[in-house]
């Protein structure tokens, strides 16, 4: 469990279109085997320390007749942002994906001070 030691808690959220590979025959749509896509996300303001980040699929368009294999995660979380990482494998064909995210953590308190 992450403990927050701040009277000021921040919540930031957003959505990112990770790719739209069906339009241009990109790797997620036309490829096979292990594939990945990543997108850098910046928070609207820095947190005091790296926040907790939850990532979710908010839209996906996947080929019928294939297995749906998707691994979505938030990695390399810092005070300023993180990387959304989406992976698939085998014969999965993904046309497009939009990912949502929410970050919760301590913010700087202008009335606070460190000893």
Image (spheres, rainbow, N blue to C red):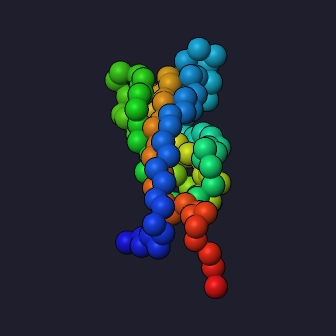
The residue at the point 41 percent across, 42 percent down is 56
Farthest residue, direction top: 23
Q: Is residue 100 visible?
A: yes
Viewer-nearest residue: 104 or 57: 104
Q: Position of residue 37 (x, y in %)?
A: 60, 39
Q: Is residue 97 above or below residue 36?
A: above
Q: Name the quadrant of the C terminus.
A: bottom right
In the shown orientation, is residue 23 left or right of residue 4?
A: right
Q: Name the quadrant of the N terminus.
A: bottom left
In the shown orientation, is residue 26 left or right of residue 9?
A: right
* Count of numbered circles in the view: 0
Viewer-nearest residue: 1 or 64: 1
The residue at the point 61 percent across, 44 percent down is 44
Viewer-nearest residue: 73 or 95: 73
Farthest residue, direction front: 111
The residue at the point 46 percent across, 50 percent down is 11
Q: Is residue 61 above or below residue 3?
A: above
Q: Is residue 105 above or below residue 13?
A: below
Viewer-nearest residue: 9 or 14: 9
Q: Position of residue 63 (x, y in %)?
A: 41, 22
Q: Is residue 87 visible?
A: no
Q: Position of residue 85 (x, y in %)?
A: 55, 46
Q: Position of residue 57 (x, y in %)?
A: 41, 37
The residue at the point 64 percent across, 16 percent down is 24
């Amino acid at each position: 469990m992450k403990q927050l030691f701040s009277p000021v808690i921040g919540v930031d959220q957003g959505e990112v279109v990770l790719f739209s590979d069906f339009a241009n025959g990109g790797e997620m749509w036309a490829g096979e085997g292990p594939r990945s896509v990543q997108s850098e996300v910046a928070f609207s303001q820095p947190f005091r320390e790296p926040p907790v980040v939850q990532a979710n699929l908010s839209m996906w368009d996947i080929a019928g007749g294939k297995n749906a294999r998707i691994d979505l995660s938030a990695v390399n979380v810092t005070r300023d942002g993180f990387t959304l990482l989406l992976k698939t494998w085998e014969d999965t064909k993904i046309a497009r994906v939009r990912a949502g995210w929410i970050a919760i953590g301590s913010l700087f308190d202008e009335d606070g001070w460190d000893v």
